[in-house]
Image (spheres, helix red, strand yellow):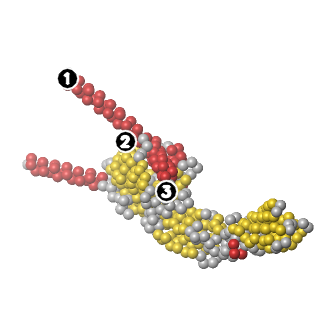
């Protein structure tokens, strides 16, 4: 009898954990990623404090948008935070994922970002980002690939109507 | 006898395991380049997914064959994930590099600039391949600024993380300057309108051109900047006459190179002329001219 109780309790705990884990991962995916920005290497122009704050805010939103869009195959978050080539590429990725029944879950563990170029007229900024990211590719509900890595990204952001938008986002082997 | 059978079984099992492992092997190239064909070695049969930064490629494959990816299919540079689903399930990460330069984003500022000013024109170039991948390896970018076909200033800058920039002085000659950025066979031109600067104090003179009734007509000499370029028509020149009755001001536009104003005749007045922050000569009219 005691053994049966223990078995039922164990089964119950396992069921609760298995149900809670995807929920927890989803919550983590929707949480804003942490972005630390350094502007010491920016040239030829110094990055003003107001611009620094805006870049951190908008780059954070951009990564949140990537997470949401790739996880749900939706385009709206991308349109709000991306422009130009980056928007074209990510839009195509979402469309292809949808067509092939795939989704990508990105568990974002933070970004160490360095501004390496800020244009003389203040219209464009280039960032070098060392991102700690866990990537899971899912076919339906099944994880078919999972890896955790530090990935180096180069991002070019330009000023748009009310925010900075990511115009180029490219990963490179370190 | 039992031992022999046992050994045989073990060998068969190992063989089978090795065969399975071989089937699961995924051979990915180390130097993939965007826009160039790619051959991926697989074992067994199944489906290959290539998940890239800007696209997903899906290919079915059968035993023994390589999966061929056409150059035009592989467009995105960056981190890719190859996933095999079928007899075995396996995944690997590989990298794709950008191709040759094929596109430049060239920002030239400002679009209109006074002549002969140091470091007033900035040119920023982002170097991409034909599939819109930022080329992160250093590339020599040539900047050339010239006016009216004359040989202008030329400078070659090496791009860093996909971007090259210069800051250039404006030429001494007014006109539409061609600002060209070139990488390899690809070049982009922007036009920067170089206009005459402020009038030159040294040559900013006026004189009395005559009298019309009870008015004095004053006129400037042809107004030029310090490089000799005529200041554009329409630029406002201010004439101020001061006498015992007070001050008279006339704002006149430059027309055909000179500015002209009619001021009330006075027995003893001082007339000054200015354009923007530049002052011209001073005239005394009347008894003490």
At a point 46% along the width and 60% down the height, the residue shown is A42
Using the numbered discs, state the Cα–Cα distance from disc 3 to disc 2 in whole angstroms: 44 Å
Secondary element type, mark 3: loop
Using the numbered discs, state the Cα–Cα distance from disc 2 to disc 1 in whole angstroms: 36 Å
Percent x, y for residue B132?
50, 60
Q: Quick check: A76 above or below B72? A: above
Secondary element type, mark 2: strand
In the image, B134: left or right of B264? left
At a point 57% along the width and 75% down the height, the residue shown is B153
In the image, B205: left or right of B76? right
Residue identified by numbered label 3: A47
Q: Residues within 10 Å of mark 3 (few under 14, many from 20)?
A: many
At a point 81% along the width and 60% down the height, the residue shown is B246
Percent x, y for residue B272?
76, 67
Percent x, y for residue A122?
54, 58
Residue identified by numbered label 1: A2
Percent x, y for residue A96?
47, 49
Marks 3 and 1, the one that precedes in the sequence: 1
Q: Residues within 10 Å of mark 1 (few under 14, many from 20)?
A: few
- Spot the residue most to the right: B213
- Spot the residue most to the bottom: B151
Q: Are marks 2 and 1 in contact (CB under 8 Å)?
A: no
Q: How many marks?
A: 3
Using the numbered discs, state the Cα–Cα distance from disc 3 to disc 1 in whole angstroms: 67 Å
Q: Quick check: B149 above or below B42? A: below
Q: What's the mark number on residue A142?
A: 2
Viewer-side residue, A9 vs B138: B138
Q: Chain of mark 3?
A: A
Viewer-side residue, B279 vs B148: B279
Mark closer to the observer (2, 1): 1
């Amino acid at each position: 009898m005691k053994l049966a109780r223990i078995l039922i309790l164990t089964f119950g705990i396992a069921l609760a954990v298995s149900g809670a884990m995807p929920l927890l991962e989803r919550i983590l995916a929707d949480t804003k990623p942490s972005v630390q920005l350094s502007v010491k290497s920016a040239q030829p122009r110094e990055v003003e404090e107001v611009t620094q704050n805006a870049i951190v805010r908008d780059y954070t939103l951009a990564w949140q948008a990537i997470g949401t869009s790739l996880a749900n195959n939706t385009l709206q978050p991308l349109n709000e935070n991306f422009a130009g080539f980056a928007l074209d590429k990510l839009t195509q990725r979402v469309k292809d994922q949808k067509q092939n029944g795939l989704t990508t879950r990105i568990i974002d563990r933070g970004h160490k970002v360095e501004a390496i170029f800020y244009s003389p007229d203040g219209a464009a900024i280039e960032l070098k980002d060392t991102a700690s990211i866990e990537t899971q590719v899912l076919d339906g509900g099944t994880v078919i690939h999972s890896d955790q890595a530090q990935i180096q990204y180069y991002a070019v952001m330009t000023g748009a109507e009310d925010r900075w938008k990511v115009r180029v986002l490219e990963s490179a082997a370190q | 006898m039992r031992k022999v059978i046992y050994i045989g079984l073990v060998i068969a099992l190992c063989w089978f395991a090795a065969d399975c492992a071989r089937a699961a092997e995924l051979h990915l190239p180390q130097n993939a380049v965007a826009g160039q064909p790619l051959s991926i070695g697989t074992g067994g049969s199944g489906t290959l997914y290539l998940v890239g930064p800007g696209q997903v490629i899906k290919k079915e494959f059968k035993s023994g064959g390589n999966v061929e990816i056409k150059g035009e299919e592989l467009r995105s540079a960056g981190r890719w994930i190859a996933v095999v689903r079928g007899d075995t399930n396996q995944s690997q990460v590989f990298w794709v590099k950008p191709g040759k330069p094929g596109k430049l984003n060239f920002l030239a500022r400002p679009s209109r600039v006074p002549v002969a000013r140091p470091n007033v024109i900035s040119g920023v170039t982002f170097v991409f391949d034909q599939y819109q991948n930022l080329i992160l390896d250093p590339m020599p970018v040539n900047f050339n600024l010239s006016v009216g076909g004359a040989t202008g200033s030329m400078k070659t800058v090496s791009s860093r993380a996909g971007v090259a920039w210069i800051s250039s002085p404006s030429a001494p000659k007014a006109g539409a300057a061609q600002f060209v950025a070139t990488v390899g066979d690809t070049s982009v031109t922007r036009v920067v309108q170089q206009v005459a600067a402020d009038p030159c104090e040294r040559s900013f003179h006026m004189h009395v051109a005559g009298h019309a009734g009870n008015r004095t007509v004053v006129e400037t000499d042809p107004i030029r900047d310090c490089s000799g370029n005529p200041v554009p028509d329409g630029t406002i020149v201010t004439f101020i006459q001061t006498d015992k009755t007070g001050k008279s001001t006339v704002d006149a536009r430059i027309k055909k190179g000179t500015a002209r104003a009619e001021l009330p005749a006075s027995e003893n007045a001082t007339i000054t002329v200015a354009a923007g922050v530049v002052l011209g000569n001073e005239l005394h009219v009347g008894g003490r001219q």
